[in-house]
Image (cartoon, helix red, strand yellow):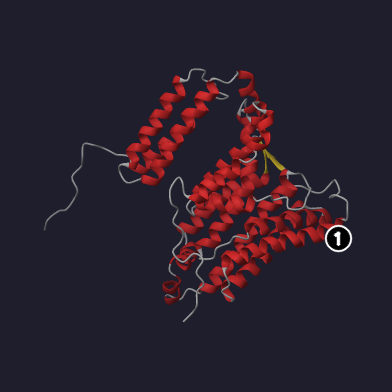
Amino acid sequence: MTNHVQPLTTRGWVPSPRAIAIAGGVLGVAAFWSTIPPFTARSPVVPIVIGVLAVAAGIWATTRGARRIGIGAIAAGVIGIGLGVVATRSSSSNLNTVFTADLIAQILAFATPLTFGALGGMVSERSGVVNVGLEGMMLMGAFWGVYVADKSGSWAVGILGAMVAGGLFALIHAVWSIHFRADQIISGMAINFLALGVTGYFFEQLYGQQNIPSGVSTVPNVRLPVISRWHFLGPAIGNLNLLIWVGILLVPLSYVILFKTPIGLRVRACGEHPRAADTVGIDVYKVRYAAVTTSGMLAALGGAFLSIGYLGGSFTENMTEGRGFIALAAMIFGNWRPFGAWGAALLFGFSTALAYRLPVYSGSAATLFQTLPYVLTLIAVAGVIGRSVPPAADGRPYVKQ
């Protein structure tokens, strides 16, 4: 009997092209980060050297099959070099004004509603239903979250109210998309306009010409006693809102549920090949209804964060301001995967936080800076970094035989 044991090789462990590309992306970020607080390298040689290493890693990975992520590493290296060189030519006072420790806290705050929305959209589309109605579900969560918190005196009850409102609107979208097999894009847009009208009407009826009264129960911050005393990490992450941490924890949790559990396997089966899923006894309709409803509840959490979290108990009409669409772009940019979507949400959050600080360089261009998140959204949905591949049955109504 022949023994087929593989012989040991003297070459040892060889990193995969994907791992090298990820390392290149990290180096691209480091090229810029090395020139801003707390590091502040003043020589342009430092970001150039680090950026060249990032580009080299991206080229190496691209030529060995990891094309999409390799191109991303190349882009990160080039952008890191450009921003790093510009930062070395900027005055230290401007750098210390723009790139402070609390910039990280702002990035996480701006990324949180996008994270909830992107994860919600991912759950829905992994089951095969396109959810363009994230914006409306997020807006419903924002209004009903602050209203229920105001009347009940409890932010926890307010969050439940927001999730119920988002879930109900998602259920409407599910009925039209799954039961009536309507065009899912049109159904989602109808949800957005309906939510805009519903929240505007009830805001006027329940509060009249007045704003939300002061003293509304709001989601508390979580203070980390040890980290909050550190020089740089303290202002960055030492006192963040509870929903920011919930959003961060949901990223690995959603990955485990979707890709490591039987529930996730059923959801993905309905989004990839619903006929085969039906054949093995999976109720495609029930799975899609549950996924879309969950999607709306997650998006509503993002809206509740805006009204009773970040803004401290306030609401204005259309306060989501397109964040649902940016969350949808983050999901596409992240290739319908939790960590990718979160990374894209952080990128959009960084661009938003940076846009509020860049007027220190040019006050006349302040309005132009505010378009940065939307420019990135166009780049993401246009597939400039690489073509994203959705689930095979995404957007296709299923008819049971």
Q: Is residue 285 above or below residue 78?
A: below
Q: Residue furthest right?
A: 209
Judge left or right: residue 330 versus residue 209.
left
Q: In this picture, is 90 found above or below 244?
A: above
Q: Amino acid at mark 1?
A: Gln
Residue shown at 67% from the left, 27% from the top = 360
Residue 85 on image: x %, y %: 50, 24
Asked where in the image residue 12 lies, by quadrant, the reply is: top left
Residue at 66 percent across and 47 percent down: it is 243
Residue 100 makes an appearance in the image? no
Would you name the residue on which mark 1 appears?
A: 205
Q: Residues within 10 Å of mark 1 (few under 14, many from 20)?
A: few
- Which residue does the image show at 44% across and 32% down from the upper left? 78
In terms of depth relative to the viewer, which is nearer, 212 or 397? 397
Residue 399 lies, in percent from the top left, at 50, 77
Of 239 and 59, the residue lying toward us = 59
Number of numbered callouts drawn: 1
**164 left or right of 131 in image:** right
- Give the image location of residue 397, x and y in percent: 52, 72
Q: Quadrant of the N terminus?
A: bottom left
The image quarter containing residue 367 is top right
Q: Residue furthest front?
A: 364
Q: Compare residues 42 and 370 and report the one nearer the observer.
A: 370
Is residue 157 left or right of 387 when viewed as pictured? right
Kind of element beneath mark 1: helix
